[in-house]
Amino acid sequence: MKESNSKHNILILGASGFLGHAIYKELCSYFNTFGTYRIHNRAYAKNQHFLQYDVEEDDVIEIIQATQPTVIISALRGDFSAQVTAHKHIFEYLTTHKTTKIIFLSSANVFDAYSQFPSYEYDKTFSQSIFGHFKIKIEDMLMRLPKKQYTIVRLPMVFGTHSPRILELKTLLQAKEPIEVFPNLIMNATTDSKVTQQIHYIINRNKSGVYHLGSTDLVHHDDFIKDLVNTLGNFHPVYKQVYTTNNNRYLAVLPKHQRLPKHLQLESKDILQELSL
């Protein structure tokens, strides 16, 4: 990807997780990139660009002061209340450091109480899940910053060759365990490789506000998972159909107001094609 700007110092919180690590690998050749890891790992400990950080134990401000980032990417996982506290500290830091911005990885679950329509960037958030509530709490906090200082990236299900979802599917297939599918769920999805390219672009072009980084088309969960399983090898899967409602239910984040260039968009067929390679 061209036009990278090496003047950025980037700090990825949660860089040892699935998506955080993919973002680190995408950005580290272009920017001065730091990442945090939670559990002691010799490979990370040897890398001077990785710092050990436990959201429940450590002070995030110490990590920020040690790395002096211009962009903080939050891909944290772990205890929700500890994450909220960490983001409060980040918010306070950003109010006095106007040249630093945050990219927060949020979720389609901020809309999981709406079931009759897909959701767009400026729709009101409303969730009935603990996970969705937690993401909304951090989103609302960050939206009190000047718009140029935050980018909220809402993600649907993220797949990738080594993603937890694919690894779980392979485990179930090999064990001949049933795979749960939701025939009434209409959704979109994405891949780790596409999300990392999109975040790279957002940093390069200094984009801000709210972005929905899902596929531009919608699919039924059961159809998509069955197509996906077909790409994983010659299995004889057993499916367990789960009906949470009698009607179709949407959990999809579609772009409308903040569209990325064509080469950074994808459809569900692109996801299946990438995972079959």
Image (cartoon, grey):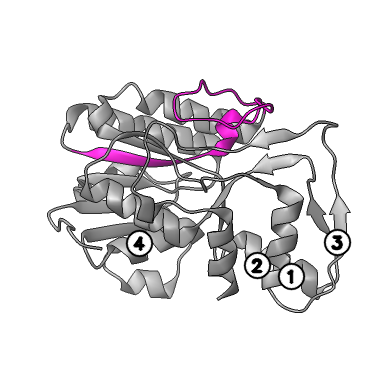
Q: Nearer the viewer, residue 217 or 67?
A: 217
Which residue does the numbered mark 2 point to in the structure image?
167
Please give the label number shown on residue 178. 3
Three-letter residue code for mark 2: Leu
What distance separates the C-alpha of mark 4 from that of mark 2? 21 Å
Q: Are marks 2 and 1 in contact (CB under 8 Å)?
A: yes
Discs 3/1, front:
3
* Relative vertical location of residue 112 with respect to residue 215 in this rendering, above or below: above
Residue at left offset 14%, top offset 58%: 6
> From this viewpoint, is residue 63 visible?
no
Q: Nearer the viewer, mark 4 or mark 3?
A: 3
Where residue 171 sits: x, y (%)?
74, 70
Nearer-N-terminus badge (3/2):
2
Compute the Cα span from label 3 to label 1.
Answer: 11 Å
SS at mark 2 in the image: helix
Answer whether labels 3 and 2 touch (C-beta < 8 Å). Answer: no
> Going by the image, does 9 lie left or right of 80?
left
Residue 103 higher or lower than 53, as above or below? above
> Which SS type dominates the magenta stretch?
loop
The answer to whether the residues at label 4 and label 3 have Cβ atoms under 8 Å apart is no
Q: Nearer the viewer, residue 102 or 246?
A: 246
- For residue 168, which quarter of the picture? bottom right
Q: Could you tell me which secondary element the residue under label 3 belongs to?
A: loop
> How far is mark 1 from mark 4, CA to CA?
27 Å
Q: Which residue in the protein does label 4 denote?
A: 24
Residue 253, quarter of picture: top right
Three-letter amino acid code of the residue under disc 3: Pro
Q: Nearer the viewer, residue 257 or 163?
A: 257
